[in-house]
Every structure is written in structure tokens, then in C-alpha cells.
């Protein structure tokens, strides 16, 4: 697979055929994630993109062992070459993985920060919990350093979360996520609700932490943010990864190979601003063939009969090749 | 259609978040109001939607000066404005099916009999199937719920539609789809639009003109 040839070092995270099923009352299952296969290397950022409800957050919860009791997982997700997150068990995950080997940058920092405690108090508590730093003075210094790493201003350390702007709350949450010095950062929609300037600042900071040698898996529906930060992009549709591509060829030329990915990019206001007709299928009632067939202009009988396998980083019977997007972009700009 | 003159509004009279703001939206016009988050755009949008009483200033809606906000607003003014907010989960009663949610404004204005016809008209426009209409908010995605919230805002055929960060949580395709619904409705009804947001590229593509949140007032800027 091309996607894997690009990452010769031992990946920080190696996901193989990961599937998540929710067992529902009445016997109907929800196929939230099916056969996901990807890896992330040190110093690399992979952006997982796709519309709301396509299974991105379920995938993240599976990696953290935070799925509800009615969920069943299969496949593997090996962290650092030695720990399968899907079979590790809650004790191991709680003691050695979450916070220590996987830093979680949350979707809603406001909800993640404890409202009744200052940023300093939360940083200090997490430092005591995750690191060997002891003694009031040392912990205080380390809290200052942790804040600085995420560009959180020192003169705001004694504030409570509700006294912070959205951007500062996001940095406080990032500072907390970085404390354990985890080799993998997992960020689920870290920029939702932030305005463009703040989105850019937030992703630039996450990129900086990646460049220091961490692996970053960022989950987002914001394609502009993905383009800015990612080395590679994984596109998810109806619970499956349908394309993995280098960020540059994907957003630039020759463009995406999967028709859904192309539709998503063309929907951007700076491109055609045209929606993909229809809506994604229900994850509880997926068709036998390609899940995108009902919305795809290239669909034929083979597409409705036979589900395309994910091969050579693409799951499509009639992938697009060599399609440049500069033309549509120029037309939109004119 | 909408004229806001020297509006001052907020949650604490000593520290208003909106100060002395002017904004106007002509009949059939689409105006984008651009500004960073937390600047007071949403407060102004709520004033325009008759949901928040300003501390000072004058508002005119369809030629009539507004004298009351919230429950004090006369019904014909209230029903002339449709609103969609950023977070559909915060503005949708979790006990209602999407069908009931869309029909809510008709019921509360005593037009229950129009429900079946109007819902049947709107559901395909916003892309909701019969099956989705029967579901409750927890059983649908954010994008699907926002489609229902948009249908609810259109159900009384408002002459002014206010979209406050309507698509901020949505993917590119759903965003383009909802904007297309709004534009289809406007083309057919002649309604005006106030679209509030922080995404310059989106609002400049969508609206006839955009205005930027200024230091003291909203200044006019040409469409990019
Ligand atoms: N506890 C659960 N039980 C049943 N279905 C669930 C549960 N949690 C999520 N789902 C379903 O899984 C699918 C994927 O959801 P999610 O991962 O949150 O999407 P995304 O993060 O891509 O927006 C959705 O159809 C959602 O309704
Ligand atoms: S497999 Fe067929 S229906 Fe599916 S995306 Fe490819 S061309 Fe379209
Ligand atoms: Mg999610």
C-alpha cells in the first residue's frame, strides 16, 4: 500500500481492519466503523475527515477504550509496536495509555476543563498525576513550563475556564494534553466553533507539537484546517475509510481519487459551492455495494452489487485519476 | 426590510456587548455580517430576531418600528422573522420528532391545520425523508437536525431569515446544501437574509454584500 510505504519507521499507531458495531435492542446493528486501516508515524499528522455522523468520533473512542458497553470491536490498533488498544483492558488504558501515551486534545475545551478550578490548579494536578515532579515549587515551575509549551499566557494562569476566550481555553486544554509527553496526540474536532484566525493558530500550534516528533491524528470536518496541518488525509464515508492520500496531491493537483472526496472538496465555497446530492445512508442499514452509490455520478451495476475493497489507499471501482481541480478553483475565483 | 439604528444591547447595562450599531437589510437583500467569535454578533442577531430587547436604539421591521421583544412582540412581527442558530441541539426540544419540531411555529400560532401540507412541502426541500421526520433529535446527526431547524425557520414563510453561524458545525457538502435551501426559498419568496458568521469566504460567496463588525459600529465593506 502506498500509504504505508510513505511511513517506513515503526508507526506510533497502526490500525488494522478496525470495526465497531453497536448492538441495538431489536437486533439491528449499527456499523459505525468498518475495516479501518491506517497508520501514523512520529512527526506525522494524519487528518481524518468526513461529514458528521460518519464514525470519526467512534473510531477515536475505540482507540481510547471509551466506547459504551453495547459496542463490539474487531481488528487491531497497535500503539508503539507493543500495545493493542482494542484488547488492552481498562486498567492498562487508564494507567498507562490515556494521558501518558495518548494525549487527548478535546472537542470542547470548555467542557473538558473543570469549571471551578483555575488553569494553574488543573495543570498542577495533571502534573502530579502523570509525571514524577514533586514539591510545591517544582510543580509550580513545571505548570508554568507546560502552559508556555502551548503558548498559554502566564498572566492568565490564575483564571477560571469561564474567564478565558475560546482560543485560550483551547490552549489550556492543549497544555493539559501535552503534559504526559505522549508520543501520540489525538484531537477530535479541536477547532469547531473557533473563527478562522483562531483555527489557524490552533492548528499551527498542533503542527509545532507534531514537528517535535509526536504523531498527530486530527479528526475534523474542516477541510481548510486539514489542508493546513496534515501530511496525509484519510476520508471517511459511512463508517469506512474510502481514500488515504498525501495532503498536497489531495488538495492540489491531481486532486482526490474518490468521487465522494471530490464532491466534498467541490462543495467548498471557494470552489463550486455545490452540495453532493442526497445524504449518507444510515449506518444501521448500509447497502450491499458501495455506500456512496446512491449519490455517485459514476455508479454502475458493479457499484451497487459489489462493495469496493480498500486497496492501494482507495475504495472505489472507478477511481478518478489525473483530474486537476485548478480549473474549477479558477472558475470560482473569477 | 430591517433597519437597526444605534442599537446598544447586552446582558449587563454597565457593559453592553453591542454598542451604537447600525445595520440595514433591504427587501430581498442578502447581507453577511462578519466578525470574530464573542464580538457580539449573536446578540445583535437576537435583537433583530426579536429575541433580545436592546438597551437603546431603534429597530424597524418591514416599515414598522418594533416596540416589544420576546413575548411582548406582536405576533405579526414575530412570524415575519425566521431564525437558525449554530447549535441545533441547543435549539431543538429533544422530546419532539423532527416533524413536530418543524411544525412547532404553526401549532403555536394556531395554524395546526396547515401542518401536513407545509411539512410535506418543506421536507423534500431540506432533504428529510419520511423516516427521518419520525425520529427524535438524539437519533439523527447534527447535519440532519440542522436541516429540520432550517425547515422550522421557514415554516411560517418569513420575510426575513436570520442565520447565525448556521453551518459552523457542518461539513462542506451539508453547508452548501443548506445554503442552497435558503437561496431556493429566497428566490421563490423574495425574503431577505441576514447571515451572521466568521467565515469570510462563505459569506462573500453567499451574500449580496458583507459588513464587518467594527470598533463602534458595523461598517460597510464592499463584497470581496
Ligand atoms: N452509543 C451509541 N449507540 C449507538 N449508536 C451510536 C452510539 N454512539 C454513536 N453512534 C452512532 O455511530 C455513528 C457515528 O457517530 P460519530 O462517530 O459520532 O460520528 P462523527 O464523529 O463522524 O460525527 C452515528 O450514526 C451515531 O449515531
Ligand atoms: S465504487 Fe462506484 S459508486 Fe462507489 S464511489 Fe466508486 S464509482 Fe462511485
Ligand atoms: Mg465527532
Image (cartoon, helix red, strand yellow):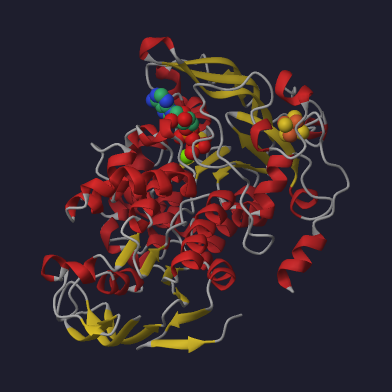
> Can you say which quadrant of the picture contains the N terminus of chain A?
top right
**Which residue is found at the position 65% from the left and 57% from the top?**
A228
Quarter of the image holding residue B166?
A: bottom left
In the rendered view, would you say A91 is above or below A256? above
In the rendered view, would you say A311 is above or below A23? below
**Which residue is found at the position 38% from the left and 50% from the top?**
A109
Q: How many marks?
A: 0
**Which residue is found at the position 18% from the left and 56% from the top?**
B109
Q: Nearer the viewer, residue A283 or B183?
A: B183
Expressed as whole percent of the image width and height from the top left, the position of residue B174 reads 53, 49
Residue A315 visible in image: no
Expressed as whole percent of the image width and height from the top left, the position of residue B222 reads 56, 86
> Can you say which quadrant of the picture contains the C terminus of chain A?
bottom right
In the rendered view, would you say B172 is above or below A245? below
| Picture quadrant of ligand 1 | top left
Q: Residue furthest left?
A: B72
Determine whether, in the image, residue A300 is placed left or right of residue A49. right
Q: Residue furthest top?
A: A27
Expressed as whole percent of the image width and height from the top left, the position of residue A221 reads 55, 47
Determine whether, in the image, residue A46 is placed left or right of residue B190. right
In the rendered view, would you say A95 is above or below A267? above
Expressed as whole percent of the image width and height from the top left, the position of residue B82 reads 32, 63
Residue B70 visible in image: yes
Q: Nearer the viewer, residue B28 or A179?
A: B28
Amino acid at each position: 500500500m502506498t500509504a504505508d510505504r510513505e511511513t517506513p519507521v515503526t508507526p506510533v499507531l497502526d490500525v488494522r481492519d478496525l470495526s465497531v458495531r453497536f448492538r441495538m435492542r431489536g437486533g439491528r446493528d449499527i456499523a459505525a466503523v468498518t475495516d479501518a486501516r491506517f497508520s501514523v508515524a512520529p512527526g506525522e499528522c494524519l487528518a481524518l475527515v468526513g461529514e458528521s455522523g460518519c464514525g470519526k468520533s467512534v473510531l477515536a473512542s475505540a482507540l481510547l477504550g471509551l466506547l459504551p458497553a453495547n459496542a463490539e470491536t474487531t481488528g487491531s490498533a497497535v500503539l508503539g509496536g507493543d500495545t493493542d488498544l482494542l484488547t488492552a483492558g481498562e486498567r492498562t488504558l487508564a494507567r498507562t495509555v490515556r494521558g501518558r501515551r495518548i494525549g487527548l486534545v478535546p472537542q470542547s475545551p470548555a467542557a473538558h476543563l473543570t469549571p471551578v478550578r483555575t488553569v494553574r490548579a488543573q495543570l498542577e494536578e495533571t502534573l502530579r498525576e502523570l509525571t514524577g515532579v514533586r514539591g510545591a515549587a517544582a510543580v509550580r515551575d513545571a505548570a508554568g513550563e507546560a502552559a508556555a509549551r502551548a503558548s498559554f499566557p502566564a498572566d492568565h494562569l490564575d483564571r477560571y475556564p469561564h474567564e478565558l476566550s475560546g482560543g485560550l481555553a483551547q490552549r489550556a486544554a492543549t497544555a493539559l494534553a501535552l503534559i504526559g509527553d505522549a508520543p501520540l496526540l489525538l484531537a477530535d474536532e479541536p477547532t469547531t466553533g473557533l473563527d478562522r484566525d483562531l483555527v489557524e493558530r490552533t492548528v499551527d500550534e498542533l503542527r509545532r507539537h507534531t514537528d517535535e516528533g509526536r504523531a498527530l491524528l486530527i479528526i475534523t470536518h474542516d477541510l481548510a484546517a486539514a489542508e493546513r496541518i496534515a501530511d496525509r488525509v484519510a476520508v471517511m464515508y459511512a463508517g469506512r475509510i474510502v481514500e488515504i492520500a498525501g495532503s498536497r496531491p489531495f488538495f492540489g493537483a491531481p486532486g482526490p481519487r474518490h468521487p465522494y472526496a471530490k464532491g466534498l472538496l467541490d462543495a467548498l465555497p471557494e470552489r463550486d459551492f455545490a452540495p453532493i446530492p442526497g445524504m449518507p445512508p444510515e449506518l444501521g442499514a448500509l447497502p450491499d455495494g458501495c455506500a456512496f452509490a446512491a449519490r455517485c455520478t459514476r455508479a454502475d451495476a458493479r457499484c451497487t452489487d459489489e462493495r469496493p475493497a480498500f486497496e492501494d489507499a482507495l475504495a472505489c471501482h472507478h477511481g478518478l485519476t489525473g483530474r486537476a481541480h485548478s480549473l474549477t478553483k479558477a472558475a470560482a475565483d473569477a | 426590510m430591517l433597519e437597526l439604528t444605534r442599537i446598544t444591547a447586552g446582558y449587563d447595562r454597565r457593559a453592553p456587548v453591542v454598542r451604537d450599531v447600525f445595520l440595514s437589510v433591504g427587501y430581498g437583500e442578502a447581507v453577511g455580517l462578519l466578525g470574530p467569535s464573542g464580538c457580539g454578533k449573536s446578540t445583535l442577531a437576537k435583537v433583530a430576531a426579536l429575541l433580545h430587547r436592546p438597551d437603546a436604539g431603534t429597530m424597524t421591521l418591514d416599515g414598522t418600528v418594533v416596540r416589544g421583544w420576546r413575548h411582548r412582540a406582536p405576533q405579526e412581527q414575530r412570524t415575519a422573522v425566521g431564525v437558525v442558530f449554530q447549535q441545533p441541539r441547543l435549539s431543538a426540544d429533544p422530546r419532539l420528532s423532527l416533524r413536530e419540531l418543524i411544525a412547532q411555529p404553526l401549532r403555536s400560532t394556531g395554524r395546526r391545520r396547515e401542518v401536513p401540507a407545509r411539512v410535506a412541502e418543506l421536507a423534500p426541500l431540506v432533504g428529510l425523508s419520511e423516516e427521518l421526520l419520525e425520529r427524535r433529535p438524539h437519533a439523527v446527526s447534527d447535519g440532519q437536525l440542522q436541516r429540520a431547524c432550517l425547515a422550522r425557520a421557514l415554516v411560517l414563510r418569513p420575510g426575513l431569515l436570520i442565520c447565525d453561524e448556521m453551518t459552523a458545525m457542518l461539513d462542506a457538502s451539508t453547508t452548501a446544501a443548506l445554503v442552497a435551501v435558503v437561496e431556493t426559498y429566497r428566490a421563490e419568496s423574495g425574503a431577505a437574509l441576514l447571515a451572521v458568521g466568521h467565515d469570510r469566504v462563505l459569506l462573500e460567496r453567499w451574500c449580496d454584500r458583507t459588513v464587518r463588525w467594527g470598533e463602534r459600529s458595523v461598517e460597510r465593506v464592499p463584497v470581496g
